Image (cartoon, coloured by chain):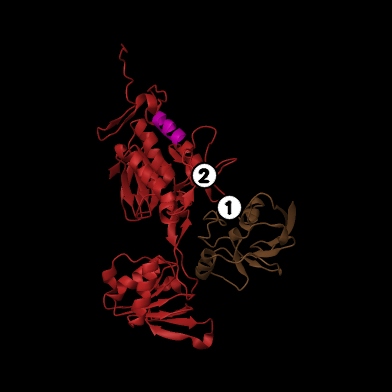
Amino acid sequence: MDIKIKITDREGILHEVEAPTDMNMNLMEVVRSYELAPEGTIGICGGMAMCASCQCYIRSGHELPEKSDDEEAMLAEAFNVEESSRLGCQIPISPELEGLEVELAPEEL
Amino acid sequence: MIKTDILIIGAGPVGLFAVFEAGLLKLKCHLIDALPQPGGQCAEIYPKKPIYDIPGFPEILAGDLVDNLMEQIKPFQPGFTLGERADTIEKREDGSFVVTTNKGTKHHAPIVAIAGGLGSFEPRKPQLQYLSKYEDNGVTYIIRDPEVYRDKKVLIAGGGDSALDWSIFLADVAKEITLVHRRNEFRGALDSVEKVQELKNKGIINLITPAEVVSLEGNGVLEAVYVRKNNNPREDMRIEVDNFVPLFGLSPKLGPIADWGLEIEKNAIKVDNALDYQTNIPGIYAIGDVNTYPGKLKLILCGFHEATLMCQSAYQRIFPDKKYVMKYTTVGGVEGFDGSKKEAPKAVVKAIE
């Protein structure tokens, strides 16, 4: 089953994309699969919560899985962090996320 | 000048395995890496994480994979230039290359294989105004010689192992040591966290959490930093320091290689995947995560394949007139440059009476 997600890229452009819930994918991988951020600027650590290149701001009221210690720790060292910040690689695509709205955080330079 | 047959830039798993494949062809290798130890990301970022898709290994820790590769290539006596970043490349008239590092070490080889992964690891810098002005004038990202900080007022920012370990180490050296972290929790080895707690209780380490450095002050050289506690500007405090050391980990950057005249696409080096992973500059190859071609997958196992084909092509480039066919290690064994020889034990021929 696919769900619809609204992703605002780093240039401020809104993309409405479909994401599969049955492919063990996470939000970072969805962004990469649609190439909404240039390769090499997102998902650098591969999805281990060891960099913050997939940081995004959650703009809708969806209930998300709680942050792991690793994610908490990484967000504590990341830049441009807001209250709604999450690491995309730590958010699995599940049916409950239908209609999720997120915005990609700026690239760390 | 260091001379070798194949100069490998990047000592990650793919660069290391290239040494083995080159060794089978009697080609010598030398590796350059910006990190102080071989292994690339596997050693630096996730040594304790398991990998499940190395053929023949149902599960292997990244650090163990590096140890195994180092063992596997030992007979081929690779040279290493570690802790230095490959900065410039110069093509000589005979088609060979001279690669110079940021510390001026020169390497000469007919073949260059870039196995640079995501690039060289550079320190992550905090986003502070005038930061670059104070770099090397009180702000440093890597502690090389702890003696520099003797009897100085030092402020370290960060919440990982290096922030903890250096705070502990410099507690004995510096005049004053302050540790600032955005959270109350630290991510580090348990004994490091406990040691910092102990030093804080004794009043040796001045621990400020949750807080962050928000601005820098000084006339030419750094004199003070402003630390904001609890995200509240009214709690800002001015702390006089000689040194500010932000330790926010490392992030990979393609770096100077991007200016070598190689064709770059998607932050990676374009190669000919139909043939031999050569770049647009003959004699320079790119293997592993650093390259791109249609259908590219950034997997260690794919990098091993690319390294193998690269070595065959490199051999033909170095010895255009020699005939050679690939030989199985089961048949030919492994003859090291150190005189060692590994081979399959011979079958016993003996009559049964």
Q: Residues within 10 Å of mark 1 (few under 14, many from 20)?
A: some
The chain assigned the colour brown in the figure is A
Which residues, given as a range, are shown in magenta? B308-317
Q: Nearer the viewer, residue A96 or B132?
A: A96
Query: Regarding mark 2 in the picture, which secondary structure is present there?
Result: loop
Q: Are marks 2 and 1 on the same chain?
A: no
Q: Residues within 10 Å of mark 2 (few under 14, many from 20)?
A: few
Q: Position of residue B185 (x, y in %)?
A: 47, 73
Q: Is residue B141 visible?
A: no
Can you identify the residue that label 1 sits on?
A: A39
In the figure, is residue B229 to the left or right of A64?
Answer: left
Task: Write the residue at 44% across / 52% down.
Answer: B41
Q: What number of labels is visible?
A: 2
- Give the colour chain B carries in the figure: red
What number is the disc on residue B299?
2
Q: Amino acid at mark 2?
A: Leu
